[in-house]
Amino acid sequence: MKSRRPNAFFSVLLVVCFAGSMLVESRLDQLRPAATLEEVLYIPSSKVVKRMSVGFEGLVADIYWTRVVQYFGAKHIENASQYKLLYPLLDMATDLDTHLIPAYEFGSIFLTQPPPRGAGEPLKAAALLQKGIRENPDSWRLYQGLGFIYYMELKDYPAAGRAFEQGSKIPGAHPFLKVIAARTLQKGGDYQTAQMLWQAVYESFNDGLIRDNAIKHLRALQVDQDVLQLEALARTYAARTGHLPAGFNELVAVHVLPSVPRDPLGYPYELFPDGHVMVEFYRELPFITQGLPPGQQPSDMDLSTRGK
Amino acid sequence: MTQRIAAIAANTFREAVRDRVLYNLILFALLLVAAAVLFGQISLDIERIVVINLSLTSISIFGVVIAIFIGTQLVSKEIEKKTLYTVLARPVRRWEFIIGKFFGLIETLGVNTFFMALGFYAALFYVSHGLHPSDLNILLAIYFIVLQFVIVIALALLFSSFSTPIFSAIFAFALFVIGTFADDLKNFAKLSEGTVHWVIAGVAYALPNFGSLNVISSVAHDQPITFALFANNTLYAALYSCAVVSGAVLIFERRNLK
């Protein structure tokens, strides 16, 4: 009986104080984002960090890489327009551990994508991959990434072709690199090569987000090609009959088309009396440059995920 | 009741002050503060930043070491020397004993930090050729360091109430290190989904958060500390240490001392 009262009192105190501390901590978290994710790298020198890690630079590199992922994730969630610390953090992580391949592979993707999906710094992404290739010349995936950035972002098709070609010579490289290298050097800039590149990304990565992104780009390329072909078809019909078709049903009725064409999501394309073709739900098809409503600018943003 | 707790606290303070190891640690911390002055001189344009970073880090680390070193021995020493039986034979309850020890150790750490802070301000005065109004901001960082000590003392006391000094020290130090990275756990929770998210978030909030109490880098770069952060950190340290000490009391109340 003697010890029951303090026991009950301290049990209640423990529960109340613990719950209270959690509430205060959540308030502290709201107060501190500016402090914790501040755009300042207090120790910008990897040499200093290396010395300070007293031989455990591998572990410190892992911690920096984790920081990169957290920084990118936090910025991505808030739809940030700037990713100031992304490259310095990646540079630090890869200085500390030069063989940290995921940091080069994923880091270059984070750097390349335009804001708010990424930092929109393809030159820095290329520099990061070149550094990775210098340190890891046997990693064909780094050449693939470099070629991809040259092709898609920097539109430097000869450089892209050279990167793919060098990667294809590495033992164990995926056979498609040879094909892509040849095609890029011959026909840089066409839709088919771009499709091939995204298909290669889809097939060579296991990460769900990267594969999902590749699928969206593949769909967008398909839409762009479909719209251009369908508009050309409408113009040909107009040249033959003297008037533009009122809709796809007219083209189906005269057997120019077997059925109303559909976009990769299965929705029918719309043909307007002025000969333009539009997709019905353009927000569900990020990255498309054709088939958009009048005045709608092509967007690099994945609008389908916004507001969810 | 208050008198009994105060008497135990005063006795704990006296006992800690007699410990020679304690002086060695303080001396070592002060030496590091002095080393910061030399280190600052061989760096370029960041002497003041180096002095603040290195000194406050020394105060924090050595304070934590002292808190763990003394805190984990508080109960076991009394049992080993059989002095606990003498204390508990008097009209002193077990919970009063634990709370008295807790406040006694806070007093010890408070005095230690005061002297280490004096040494730090002397070093800062030497490097900056005087003190500036913005240096008062550093006092807040030192206050937050003391709040860290309060939580560490509570943890050390909790573990020492049921474990050996060595294991208590390991547990307390491990929790200090994990608690320093609590923000990383929360960020990790934000990026995960479903059950994993809730489990990690739960663990992150259950662990002590030393991240919000560490503003050393901010004050080194003259970034202001808001009143809201001051108030919430104070409240957090009070609530968390109160919960942990309550846990220590509950365990110690049930402990068989025969």
Image (cartoon, rainbow, N blue to C red):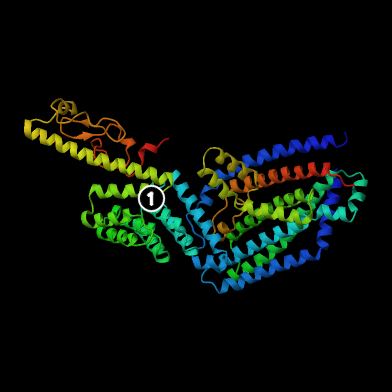
Residue in the image at 59% along x and 72% along y? B39
Q: Quadrant of the C terminus of chain A?
A: top left
Q: Quadrant of residue B124?
A: bottom right
> Badge 1 sits on which subunit?
A
Residue B46 position within the rendered picture, expressed as x and y whole percent measured from the top left = 53, 68
Residue in the image at 23% along x and 34% along y? A278
The answer to which of A187 and B191 lies nearer the viewer is: A187
- Can see residue A64? yes
The answer to which of B163 and B1 lies nearer the viewer is: B163
Residue A14 position within the rendered picture, expressed as x and y whole percent measured from the top left = 73, 39
Residue B88 position within the rendered picture, expressed as x and y whole percent measured from the top left = 90, 47
Circle 1: is it few (<14), some (14-19), or many (20+) Cα within 10 Å?
Answer: some
Q: Quadrant of the N terminus of chain A?
A: top right
A271 with respect to A137 (left or right): left
Q: Which residue corresponds to mark 1?
A: A204
The answer to which of B15 and A156 lies nearer the viewer is: A156
B25 with respect to A61 (left or right): right
Task: In the rendered view, tell whether residue A12 sits above or below residue B70.
Answer: above
- Can see residue A85? no
Q: Quadrant of residue A306?
A: top left
B212 with respect to A104 (left or right): right
The answer to which of A209 and A29 lies nearer the viewer is: A209
